[in-house]
Image (spheres, rainbow, N blue to C red):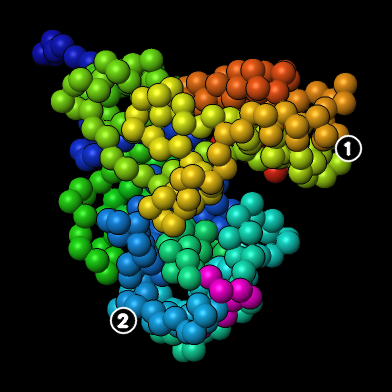
Amino acid sequence: MKIPHLVLPFFCFLVFSGFTFRVTEDLGSLDWGKGEVPPLVIEQLMEGLTTSGENGAPVPALASGWKAGRGAKHFIFFLRAGAKWSDGKPVCAQQFVDAWRRVQSPEFASPYAHYLSDLQSAHAVGCDRLEVRLKHSAAYFPALASHWVLAPIRLDLLKKFGRNWLRPENLAVTGPYVLDSWVAEKEFILKRNPSYYGPSPNEERLKAVVVSDDATALNLFQSGALDWLRDVPFLEKERLAKTKEYSVYPAFVGYHLGFLMNGEAALDRNARCALAQALDKRNIPLILKGGETAAGGILPPGLGGDAEAGKFDAARARQLWSSSRASKPGIPLELNYYAKDIHGVLVQWLQQEWKKNLGIDVRLIRTEPKTYWAQLLFHGGIYFR
């Protein structure tokens, strides 16, 4: 006798257990030597000789300490005893030498090779000592050594796995987390690195969700799909600032203009200075409304920068512009910018300032992340970042 039975459909939804946050882009690589990687992801995966302390000053990381020679042209870094890669292999000085040579290599063509432009030589003395000599005095070098571009590399893994060395099952890292999985342009899943020398992080697992649009990311946060969100839609900032979830913290982040420096369309020094002096940067905090500080130069005031440098001078800017080659009729000006709400607000302000103070028209070109970085590497023009 057959017993009648009912078959019910069964659906299983896997809920991520861990801390979830947003990253704005996945450029297709986690090769920290190239530099163009999601910062919030690579900072969990890789540590270098130093890291940034609470006040922005460098503190020991894979180096337990360092000694500076007279004139800040010679540094000795002492590597931390027991520091290991996630596969259990020791972190050694030669791995930094290998990484820096790779970054400097013309064949590798790292966009961040200039970070090592002051490097004269790097020499490993055994596994636990790295000697660095610089072409010029550079007291900032221990701080620079905190950047992921200067993190160590495992040439043995590059040789063994070739193009697949960044796959989760092959990648060895030095940070508090390892790469568990990676779905291109969707998400990165990280889990605790049991070989990490430092304190074990609070969260067992992290998920970095790739969301390029600020409004979409905010909706995900408000629905509970994200635990933390750094960039919010510009037009929502004032409303969100009144909520208990919103907080503001200082960060050493600067924006600058990059100019084409060769070819027929290159802007001469007078043109570049005119574009800079035509901007009344005192208005930027009023426009962005997020506690920003107007920059006088590349370095912020907290790192020795001069807030009074590069002052606004419309009359001088007009004089410089009129004497530049760019003032001749028929020379178009275009400003490419990275597609992001806050960038759009800033470049529109730039456009208005240049029109008001120099009488020139600048065409704005909003560019998606991957296209933007490709153009930055291979094409000319004015670039905002």
Query: Which disc number belongs to residue 264?
Result: 1
Mark 1 residue element: loop
- Position of 247 relative to 205 (above/below): above
Mark 1 nearby-residue class (10 Å; few <14, some 14–19, many ≥20)? few
Q: CA distance from mark 2 to mark 1?
A: 54 Å
Residue 281 position in % (x across, y down):
51, 32
Toward which corner of the image does residue 365 lie, by quadrant?
top right
Residue at image position (47%, 53%) is: 305
Residue at image position (46%, 45%) is: 307
Residue 17 position in % (x across, y down):
20, 38
Residue at image position (69%, 56%) is: 109
- Position of 288 relative to 43 (above/below): above
Toward which corner of the image does residue 97 lie, by quadrant?
bottom right
- Under mark 1, the amino acid is Glu
- Position of 159 relative to 54 (above/below): below
Toward which corner of the image does residue 64 lie, by quadrant?
bottom left
Asked if the residues shown at circle 2 and circle 1 are in contact, with their CB atoms under 8 angstroms apart, the answer is no
Left or right of residue 122: residue 49: left
Residue extending farthest front: 315
- Under mark 2, the amino acid is Ala
Magenta span of residues: 131-138
Total labels: the figure holds 2
Residue 205 in view (yes/no): yes
Residue picked out by circle 2: 81
Quadrant position of the N terminus in the picture: top left
Towards the viewer: 286 or 30:
286
